[in-house]
Amino acid sequence: MANGIRITLKEAVEVELTPPGSRILTNQRYTLHGEARTVPGGWNGEGIRGSGGEPYQRMVPGSLRVYGEDRQPCYRENVDYVVDWYMGTIKRNPEGSLRDGQLLSLDYQVWLCRYDTIVILRNGEIQVIEGMTEPYESRELLLPDPPAVTEGVPLANVFLGWGQQEIHDGQVSVELYSGGNHNGKPPAITGRFEDMMPRDYYVEILDVSSEDPTFTVRMAMSGEDYGTGQQLEAASLRWSEPVLFSLEDQVPLMVPSAYGKGVDWGLAVSFASLEGLPERGACYKISAKPHMLMDRRTSPRDPLHFIERERFPHLAPVMERMRNGQPVRIAFYGESTTRSGRWPYEVAHALRTQFPACALYTSNVAVSGESSMRGIARLQDEVLSLKPDLVMIEYFINDGYSGETEASERSLRAIIEGCRRAGACCLLLTNNGRNPIFSESGSRRETYRVHEQMKRIAQETQIAFVGGYSYFFQLHLYGRYFLTELKGNMLNHPYGNVDPGWGSFDRVLADAILKGMDSC
């Protein structure tokens, strides 16, 4: 049933989906920068992609050839330069023959990705709307959006690409791999697997203490080793350090990546359902498949459906000034997604249109890379000295990256107190999530914890709150894979580098703020 129309399929229908494959790029001009000695080379900053800019991300492993500007000579991988196949990074090996700033010519391939939408028409016909494999602006990252549906009802989005040749639907299974009692009950698996590559996890019980009760485990995973271009197999796993847990703990499947950080793709294992403690020496294998199929039959229509908009009456004095045509100043105070993001200007433009008699001034006093623990030092001189009527505070991403829960809470509370004491209203917000590959605090579960912490701080200090991360957390319900929303760098920026309007997340966040302001 959709839009009051019931459509019945009398038999199963097969549809054919074509892998998006890869793209070959030749004679791409690249100015060498950055240094690395070992694979993977790591992130090398963001900017335009393609010839004359940075290479595209998700390179096909083994496809890169690096030449001099005139196509001679052909330089040696790992000797003259170091590559990162995941991020599309090429850096100089300081022990090789290349120099910083040298102009090079590159040949390489990149994996493409694409969304296809399965649609049912009123006559019961099933159609596949094939999406695009690139952005509208070719110098952006290759992170396309799902196709628009102009006729029929969307049933599902299918995410394809990055070398995948099979379609999976998020299946997860667990079995005893070695040691232990093969007749025993397996542990429970919780969470949502957020990677787009199939993986096998291995959880080995190293020690058990019945007194506490506690147990010690180490973990590893197979599959594509992001950055290195290699495949991790059962015989070549990268094991975590031993970690101690209690029997009631949910054990996050946090395993070391090639970048030297633990990565958590969303799953956890629980031994609480076992009859007693897990056995010493037992090793469990957890097979996880990606969620490539995203059911859209019950998708919320409104992206604001999940976003909390709380205590906006706190902003009533600001709204009254706007309605009365009095001047208002808004300060945007935070880090890079505020400094370079589009949402502050979406908000300002909409308010100026709505209240043309109000002289609305804005001050973007955000600093890229800054946490609230550092930003508080600027509060008086760079924020409150402007005498803002409203301060929008956004330190969600970098406070989360810091892992300093107590310190970030103290600094946020001090910022809010300082703004209130100076007579300014406050809005605290959370925004987009992060790629977990580079930070142990970048996982879905940890980012949601930071979201809940900031929501609580806003409630306890009685200021306005917008929870943009509640939408980002549920992107799969809208048929979107979260990494394709991080348009700027595939890490944490949801807006383009060339076209700041590329990407929908900032518009959704701005709409949530504006809807809250309209309510008071």
Image: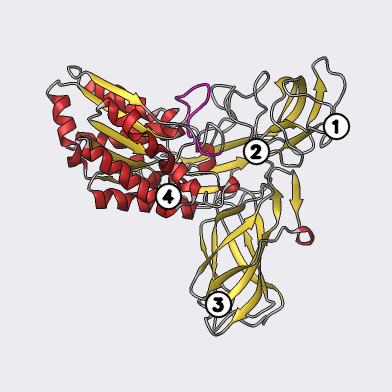
Q: Is residue 485 above or below residue 209?
A: above
Is 501 part of what is drawn in magenta?
Answer: yes
The quarter of the displayed image where residue 75 is located? top right
Query: SS at mark 4?
Result: loop
- Cα gap from disc 1 to disc 3, whole angstroms: 50 Å
Disc 3: which residue: 214
Query: SS at mark 3?
Result: strand
Residue drawn at x 47%, y 55% is: 445
Q: Nearer the viewer, mark 3 or mark 2?
A: 3
Residue drawn at x 17%, y 25% is: 322
Residue drawn at x 70%, y 53% is: 223
The kind of residue tagged 3 is Thr
The kind of residue tagged 2 is Thr
Counting residues from the start of the chain, the first of labels 3 and 4 encountered is: 4
Residue 154 appears in the rendering: no
Counting residues from the start of the chain, the first of labels 1 and 3 encountered is: 1
Residue 129: x, y in percent?
53, 35
Disc 2: which residue: 18
- Cα gap from disc 3 to disc 4, whole angstroms: 53 Å
- Colour mapping: secondary structure
Disc 4: which residue: 8
- Cα gap from disc 2 to disc 1, whole angstroms: 35 Å
* Span colored in magenta: 491-502
Seen from this angle, which residue lies furthest top?
70
Q: Quadrant of the C terminus?
A: top left
Disc 1: which residue: 76
Residue 310: x, y in percent?
25, 46
Tag 2 near tag 1, CB within 8 Å: no
In this rendering, would 482 be left or right of 168? left
Q: Nearer the viewer, residue 345 or 26?
A: 345
Tag 3 near tag 2, CB within 8 Å: no
Q: Nearer the viewer, residue 179 or 381?
A: 381
